[in-house]
Image (tube, coloured by chain):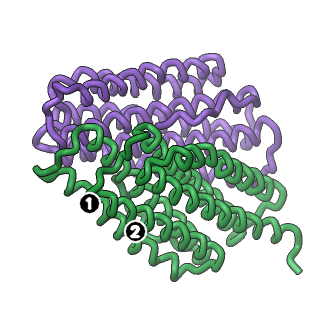
Chain colours: A purple, B green
C-alpha cells in the first residue's frame, strides 16, 4: 500500500493525464469548428477552457501543499516541479485550442479555411491530437524512451505548417487578406500546440531520468 | 535587520525587477530590429533571451528551496507563488520579443513593416516598454493601486493592434501576402507582450491584497 504522501504524488500524474484528455478534446473540437464553421463546437471549446484552468489550479495547489508539508528531495521534488511545468504547458495547449476556436467564431458563418487547405488543416488537427495522446501515455507509463519520440513526431506538424505557408506565399494564392491572416494564425496555433506537447514530454524525461533533453528554443 | 529568510524573499522581487529590465530592453531592441531592418539588434534580442530564462530558473530554484525549507504560510506563501507566476509571464514577454526579432531577421535586409505602418508599430513598441516599466515599478513599490492601472493602459495596445488590422483589411492595402503575414504576427506578439504585463500586475495585486482581480481570458 502507498502512503498518503505517495498517493498525493500519484494524484498529480492522474490530473495531468486528465488535462491531456481535455486538451485533446479541445483541439479536436476546434478543428471541427474551423473546418465546418461550427459555432457550437467553437463555443464549447471556449467555455470548456475553464475546466482545464481549474485542473491546473488544483495541481498547483497540491504541489505547493506537498512542498510545504513534506520538504521533498531528489526524485519526489523533481516530480512536483515537473508536474507544475507540465500543467503549465497543458494549460497553454488549451489556450491554443481556444485561439483556434475564436478564429472559427470570428469568421462564422463562413469557414476560416479555404477549401484547398482543408486537408492540411485536418491533418494538423489530427497530428495535434496524436501528440497530446502520446504525451498522456508517456505520463501514465512514465516512459522516457517513448517521450523522446515526440520531438520527432512534432516535425510532422512543422512540415504541415510550412505547407500552409508555402501555399499562402504562392503567386496563385487568391483568397485575400482575411484568409491570409486567419491561416497565418491558425498555422501558428497548431504549431505552438505541438511545441507544448514536446515540452511536456521533455519534462517527463527530466522527471524520470534527472537529465534534461536539448532545450533549444523551438519557436516561432 | 531582515533575517536570511526574508532577505531571500526580497531577492525574489529584485530578480523579478531585473527580468522587467531585460524584457524592456528586449522589446525596445526588437522594435528597432523591425523598423530599421537591423540584423544586429535582432540577433542581440535572440541571444539575449538566455539571460531572461536564466533568471526565471534562479527564481524557480530559490522559490522551491524556500518552500521546502521554510514551509511558508499566508502572505509569504503568496509571495513565493505569485513570484513564480510573474517570472513565467516575464519569461514569455522575453519570448515574444524574440518572436518579433525573428520576424525582422526573416525579412532582412528588407523591413517587415511597410512604411505607412511604421508609426503605429513604433507606438506599439513604446507602449510595450511603458507597460513593462510600470510592471517593474509596481513590483518594486508593491503598489496594488498602481497595478490596477495596467489593465487600462493595455487598452491602448489593443487599440493599436486594431489599427494595424483595420489597415490590413482595407481594400487599399497593397503590400502583398508576406507583409500581411508579418504584420498579423507582429500585432499579435506586441498584444501578447502587453497581456503578460497585465498578468504580472494582477499577480502583484494578489500578492499584496490576497484578492484576485478579474481574470477573464484576454486573448486573442
| Residue drawn where x is 45% and y is 78% of the image | B149
Mark 1, secondary structure of its residue: helix
Q: Pointer 2 indicates a residue of which chain?
A: B
Looking at the image, residue B73 sits to the left or right of residue B216; the answer is: right
Where in the figure is residue B85, as x and y percent of width and height? 59, 57
Q: Of marks 2 and 1, which one's residue comes earlier in the chain?
A: 2
Q: Pointer 1 indicates a residue of which chain?
A: B
> Which picture quadrant has residue A25?
top left
Where in the figure is residue B70, as x and y percent of width and height? 82, 61
Q: Viewer-proximal residue, B164 or B74?
A: B164
- To the question of a shared chain for discs 2 and 1, the answer is yes
Where in the figure is residue B59, as x and y percent of width and height? 72, 55
**Residue A98 in view (yes/no):** yes
| Residue drawn where x is 30% and y is 25% of the image | A166
| Residue drawn where x is 66% and y is 39% of the image | A82
Looking at the image, residue A174 sits to the left or right of residue B109; the answer is: left
Q: Viewer-proximal residue, B170 or B138?
A: B170
Q: Alpha-carbon distance for marks 2 and 1?
A: 13 Å
- Which label belongs to residue A128? none
Which residue has dot 1 on it? B162
Q: Viewer-proximal residue, A141 or B128?
A: B128
Which residue has dot 2 on it? B154
**Is the residue marked by circle 1 packed among few (<14), some (14-19), or many (20+) residues within 10 Å?**
few
**Is the residue marked by circle 2 packed among few (<14), some (14-19), or many (20+) residues within 10 Å?**
many
Amino acid at each position: 500500500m502507498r502512503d498518503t504522501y505517495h498517493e498525493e504524488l500519484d494524484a498529480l500524474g492522474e490530473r495531468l493525464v486528465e488535462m491531456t484528455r481535455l486538451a485533446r478534446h479541445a483541439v479536436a473540437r476546434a478543428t471541427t469548428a474551423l473546418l465546418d464553421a461550427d459555432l457550437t463546437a467553437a463555443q464549447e471549446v471556449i467555455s470548456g477552457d475553464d475546466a482545464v484552468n481549474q485542473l491546473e489550479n488544483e495541481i498547483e495547489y497540491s504541489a505547493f501543499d506537498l512542498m510545504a508539508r513534506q520538504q521533498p528531495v531528489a526524485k519526489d521534488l523533481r516530480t512536483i516541479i515537473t508536474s507544475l511545468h507540465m500543467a503549465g504547458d497543458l494549460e497553454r495547449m488549451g489556450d491554443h485550442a481556444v485561439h483556434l476556436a475564436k478564429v472559427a467564431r470570428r469568421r462564422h458563418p463562413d469557414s476560416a479555411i479555404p477549401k484547398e487547405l482543408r486537408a492540411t488543416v485536418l491533418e494538423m488537427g489530427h497530428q495535434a491530437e496524436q501528440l497530446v495522446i502520446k504525451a498522456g501515455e508517456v505520463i501514465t507509463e512514465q516512459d522516457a524512451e517513448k517521450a523522446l519520440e515526440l520531438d520527432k513526431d512534432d516535425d510532422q506538424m512543422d512540415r504541415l505548417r510550412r505547407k500552409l505557408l508555402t501555399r499562402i506565399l504562392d503567386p496563385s494564392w487568391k483568397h485575400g487578406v482575411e484568409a491570409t491572416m486567419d491561416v497565418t494564425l491558425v498555422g501558428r496555433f497548431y504549431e505552438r500546440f505541438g511545441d507544448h506537447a514536446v515540452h511536456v514530454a521533455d519534462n517527463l524525461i527530466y522527471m524520470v531520468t534527472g537529465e534534461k533533453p536539448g532545450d533549444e528554443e523551438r519557436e516561432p
